Amino acid sequence: QSVLTQPPSASGTPGQRVTIPCSGSSSNIGNNHAHWYQQLPGTAPKLLIYRTNQRPSGVPDRFSGSKSGASASLTISGVRSEDGADYYCAAWDDSLSGWVFGGGTKLTVL
Amino acid sequence: QVQLQESGPGLVNPSQTLSLTCTISGGSISNGNYHWSWIRQPAGKGLEWIGRIYTSGSTNYNPSLKSRVTISVDTSKNQFSLRLSSVTAADTAVYYCARGLSMDVWGQGTTVTVSS
């Protein structure tokens, strides 16, 4: 059971807007930044969004992040076939004094 | 361009200690105020944070693993290491090392199987 809650799957057709939610609590997302990682099959996770809504250099601007209270969201505006991957949210948890992850969402581009 | 590379035995006997090393290239482990983390992922499952070390040597561990985990840093070798004691089959996973508060750089991962 993950501390952060994500839906196990999401889907969209090319060009659609897809949003992946991540629900936490006051001790993690509610009081700290959320981060998002993309994991393509057989590869290491890659930082996609940091500090809730910042994109590292090289990440396409169709990826964006936001937060409201203790929940965060990753939005892909105009999803592409190559975006099919697993997506994980993460945050520092003040109560646990450690990082916590969501269980991951598998995005299928139909 | 900083790169991380995990190394260590791919097979560990049950009840023994798993030992892995993460070697940093393209930069110094001592440069910048970075934390250095270990994360693992059992096959087909999600990510689990194991713990982290700051260059000063201070550590934070996942409470569920704290009694079995030690993370250390060797600045002379530009490495940091993970030791996980009393391993069982449940510790079989791909182990990753990563840099920073946002975990912005990851190693490629190394598979560790716990089996006799």
Image: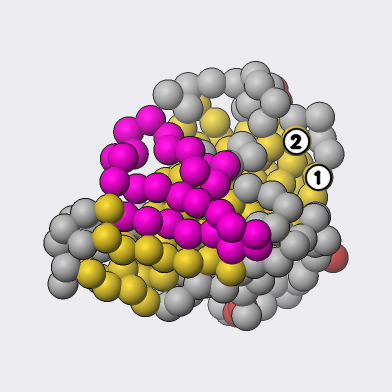
Please give left or right for residue A79 compared with residue B18 in the image. left
Q: Residue at x 16, y 72 (%)?
A: A110
Residues in magenta, as a range: A50-76
- Kind of residue at badge 2: Tyr
Q: Is residue A49 magenta?
A: no
- Percent x, y of residue A7: 45, 76
Q: Chain of mark 1?
A: B
Depth check, front residue: A28 or B43: A28
Task: Say the numbered circle drawn on residue B59.
Answer: 1
Please give left or right for residue B65 compared with residue A68 in the image. right
Q: Do the CB atoms of the residues marked 2 and 1 lie less than 8 Å apart?
A: yes
Q: Could you say whether the residue bearing mark 1 is in a helix, strand or loop?
A: strand
Graded by Cα atoms within 10 Å as few (under 14), some (14 to 19) or many (20 or more), the crowding at tag 1 reads: some
| Residue B18 visible (yes or no) | no
Q: Quadrant of the N terminus of chain B?
A: top left
Graded by Cα atoms within 10 Å as few (under 14), some (14 to 19) or many (20 or more), the crowding at tag 2 reads: many
Depth check, front residue: A19 or B52: A19
The residue where tag 2 is placed is B54
Please give left or right for residue B17 compared with residue A37 in the image. right
How far apart, in angstroms, are the residues tagged by discs 2 and 1? Answer: 6 Å
The mark tally for this picture is 2
Residue furthest to the front in view is A68
Q: Residue at x 65, y 19 (%)?
A: B31
Q: Is residue B102 above or below residue A80?
A: above
